[in-house]
Image: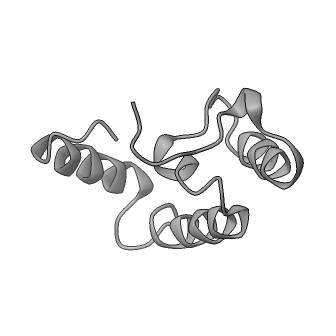
Amino acid sequence: MARIRWVEEREATGEIADVYAAWLAANPGREQIPGILKCLSLRPELFRGMDEVSGQVHFREGHLTRRVKEMIATYVSALNRCHY
């Protein structure tokens, strides 16, 4: 159970419902909003901002490909025993 209160997809209305819908449309194949983003659901403007920063920092091609960045993130999460 999360310690941070958030809005589940099925309970989302108004602005956060729009934010969730936009995120899901931009991430085909993903059926749920990740908890790391969902914890910002009470502040939709922060959700949008974090998603934008994440896209620029984590998912843009550069010296490392997205695939390599994802592998590093997965490894670090495993080391930290974090399910994200």
Quarter of the image where one finds residue 6: top right
Q: Residue at x 85, y 42 (%)?
A: 13
Q: Residue sitting at 52 percent across and 65 percent down?
A: 54
Q: Nearer the viewer, residue 64 or 26?
A: 26
Whole-percent x, y for residue 50 in the image: 57, 67
Q: How is the image coloured?
A: one colour
Residue 60 visible within the image = no
Residue 4 rendering spot, x and y as whole percentages? 45, 48
State the quadrant of the C terminus: top left
Q: Is residue 21 above or below residue 58?
A: above
Q: Residue at x 43, y 55 (%)?
A: 66
Q: Is residue 20 visible?
A: yes
Out of 69 and 62, give the one closest to the viewer.
69
Q: Is residue 46 left or right of residue 24?
A: left
Name of the residue lying farthest toward the left: 79
Number of numbered discs present? 0
User: Is 80 on the left-hand or right-hand side of 19?
Assistant: left
Judging depth in this view, the residue of 71 and 39 nearest the camera is 39
Q: Position of residue 23 (x, y in %)?
A: 72, 48
Q: Position of residue 39 (x, y in %)?
A: 52, 51
- Check the image and name the residue furthest to the right: 14
Locate the N terminus and report the quarter of the image it occupies: top left
On the image, which quarter does residue 40 sit in?
A: bottom right
